[in-house]
Image (cartoon, rainbow, N blue to C red):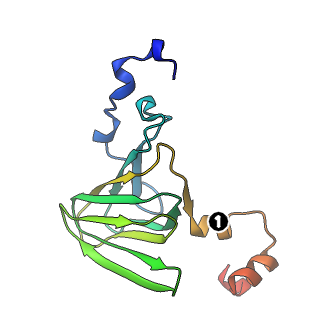
Amino acid sequence: MDPSKVIVDDFVLTGLRVPGSTKNSFKLGTNTAFAAQFPGLNDMGISITRADLDVGGIFPIHTHRVSELLIVVEGTIVAGFIDTNNNTASYTTLHKGDVMIFPPTLLYFVVNARYTPVVAYACLASENPVLQLVHFALFRNNLPSELVEKITLLDQALL
């Protein structure tokens, strides 16, 4: 960012007050404050995302290359991760005001655990964090089905 062109609006973002649309198969809506939406984050090493989960909503198993701090603002979730050293799942129920840390590169998930909508904020240790949804990586790629079957140990009937 050219310092001579910096304005106060580069350091203010009001979009996180707006709920993300949950009209999708995950019943999950997100609004992000990454460097692309929030220029003041350039070279700061931080970002934030608002996550809205409708009743039955999920943030499917995924990973980031950086750590994440999740803060529940409204509702109740089940959140957890899979330890890739021993394939052990660790999860817990989080309520309004609770916080959970997800270390970098672990596979983790979030599920709306009750019958009311959820609002949570995820603070990430990068201005441009990378999100990798595991099922998209495995099943929305250009590999032939036969190869996907082999590398996932799944039967064609399940794909």
Q: Quadrant of residue 111?
A: bottom left
The structure residue drawn at horizontal position 50% and vertical position 35%, both measured from the top left corner, is: 36
In this rendering, position of residue 130 left or right of residue 53: right
The structure residue drawn at horizontal position 47% and vertical position 12%, both measured from the top left corner, is: 4
* 116 vs 93: above or below: above
Question: Dot 1 corresponds to which residue?
Answer: 137
Disc 1 element: helix
One can see residue 118 in this view:
no
The structure residue drawn at horizontal position 78% and vertical position 75%, both measured from the top left corner, is: 145
The structure residue drawn at horizontal position 59% and vertical position 69%, both measured from the top left corner, is: 135
| Residue toward you, 106 or 119 | 106
Q: Residue furthest top?
A: 4
Spot occupied by residue 48 in the image (x, y as percentages of width and height): 37, 46
Spot occupied by residue 108 in the image (x, y as percentages of width and height): 45, 71
Q: Quadrant of residue 53?
A: bottom left
| Residue toward you, 141 or 69 | 69
